[in-house]
Amino acid sequence: MQTQIPAALADDPRVIEIEAILRKCVHCGMCLATCPTYTLLGDELDSPRGRIYQIKQVVEGHAPTADTLEHLDRCLTCRNCETTCPSGVKYGHLIDAGRSIVEERVARPLVQRLMRRALLTVLPYPGRVGPLVRMGQSVRGLLPAALRGSVPVRQRPGDWPAARHARRLVVLEGCVQPAMTPATNAAAARVLDACGVSLVRVAGAGCCGAVPYHLNEQEDALDHMRRNIDAWWPLVQGEGGAGEDGAGEGGADEAEPAFGVLATASGCGVMLKEYGHALAADPDYADKAVRLSALSMDTVEAVRAALDGLDEDALERLRARAAAVGRVAFHPPCTLQHGQRLAGVTEALLRRLGFSLTKVRDSHLCCGSAGTYSIFQPDIARQLRDNKVAAIESGEPDIVATANIGCQLHIGQGLEASGGKAVAHWIELVDRVMGSGTTR
Ligand code: SF4
Ligand code: SF4
């Protein structure tokens, strides 16, 4: 795609990045068929190619309008189009940079600005989210059905094993996950511990930065990233550190440098893998960010490697227990299959462990959660969720599992509304068949 960038914009680093990405797009339109918003709305302006064209116009000097902002806002950033594109167009980077420019030039309505500010003030901070979630859980039974689904049932996470192994992984604890689904990280810690890897928590780390990043508060997001890098750096360098569970000081006698940073929420994982890109212009953090991105891994990457430490007899025992769990419907989050390019990997691991998976049609499509998308685009988010719930239920599963807290809560809401079952992170199922789980 040819562009004509006016001199006044030519030095903006976002425009330079956009222009380089635009050059790869050949207008073929293959991405349209897999775009959830185009499929639902049927408007080319709500398709990847249409959004690419609107961003092109903006960097060529045309003034964006409220409609431009709306079409970009309706994008889920699911990156399904990126997986489909035969030309390697990096749509995720394009939409982030495009939104950043459009947002500077088009004022949002006051209510939207206030809502975004409220979310930015609360969500990235576990100390603020926790009390609100606990308050909601204490009156959950009294809430109307429509509201009840948005408050997750309180989980008992169970024990977190002491850091006894030399091989260690740092875990990203995140912002809303400790309050809403604390069983996930605890289950991952027990499964990895059983495979000879200690999962360690580090004081001072927090939100991965995805919440402010996708609400277009880039500087705020970069601060979260820098803080995490500062907190994790001593452990990945093998210099010890102030782990909450004594990871850096009183853990294993001969602990090695942590060999990775684990995100159990695939939405956070994809953000960690973008640290190198996001902090590329920061001379103090660019190199460290590239290293952190290279070290970051999703749960499935860590568990797949760690299982090699189990002997065949142990795996056979797991398979026998997994077969008794029943039929599992697995929903692969977009951040896992399109963002991290790990399509099919979790499903293969679960099958290797003996779980029986149901077929979920259109599993490449977004469930509509997409971070804060379901708050700002509730109608589209609900339609996508209802489609996903119908696809899941058609396989008549006994259990539903996924790999990202956003999808877990959003699909859980849909299943609860239809009188169905709860949704778990898949690592909880593995924890359960390993026998260490206390989450159910
Ligand atoms: S990221 Fe998803 S919603 Fe956005 S244009 Fe691509 S496929 Fe469509
Ligand atoms: S599939 Fe790729 S090259 Fe084709 S229109 Fe979409 S983004 Fe452009």
Image: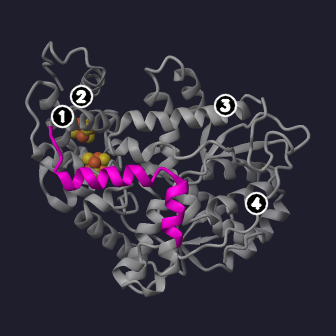
Of the two numbered discs 2 and 3 in the rendering, the one whose residue sits closer to the viewer: 3
Of the two numbered discs 4 and 2 in the rendering, the one whose residue sits closer to the viewer: 4
- Mark number displayed over residue 22: 2
Q: Residues within 10 Å of mark 1 (few under 14, many from 20)?
A: many
Q: CA distance from mark 2 to mark 3?
A: 36 Å
The image position of residue 82, as x and y in percent, is 34, 42
Q: For the stretch drawn in magenta, what is the main secondary structure?
A: helix
Residue drawn at 36 percent across, 59 percent down: 366
Is tag 4's residue or tag 3's residue first in the polypeptide sequence? 4
Quick check: marks 2 and 1 in contact, CB under 8 Å?
Answer: yes
- The residue under label 3 is 233
Task: Identify which amino acid the numbered label 2 is placed on.
Answer: Leu
Q: How is the image coloured?
A: one colour
Q: Is residue 133 magenta?
A: yes
- The residue under label 4 is 160
- Mark number displayed over residue 251: none
Q: Is residue 223 above or below residue 40?
A: above
The image position of residue 218, as x and y in percent, is 37, 35
Q: CA distance from mark 1 to mark 4?
A: 47 Å
- The residue under label 1 is 55
Q: Is residue 111 magenta?
A: yes
Q: Residues within 10 Å of mark 2 (few under 14, many from 20)?
A: many
Quick check: marks 4 and 3 in contact, CB under 8 Å?
Answer: no
- Magenta span: 106-134
Is tag 4's residue or tag 2's residue first in the polypeptide sequence? 2
Task: Identify which amino acid the numbered label 3 is placed on.
Answer: Trp
Q: CA distance from mark 4 to mark 3?
A: 22 Å
Is tag 2's residue or tag 1's residue first in the polypeptide sequence? 2
Quick check: marks 3 and 1 in contact, CB under 8 Å?
Answer: no
Q: Residues within 10 Å of mark 3 (few under 14, many from 20)?
A: many
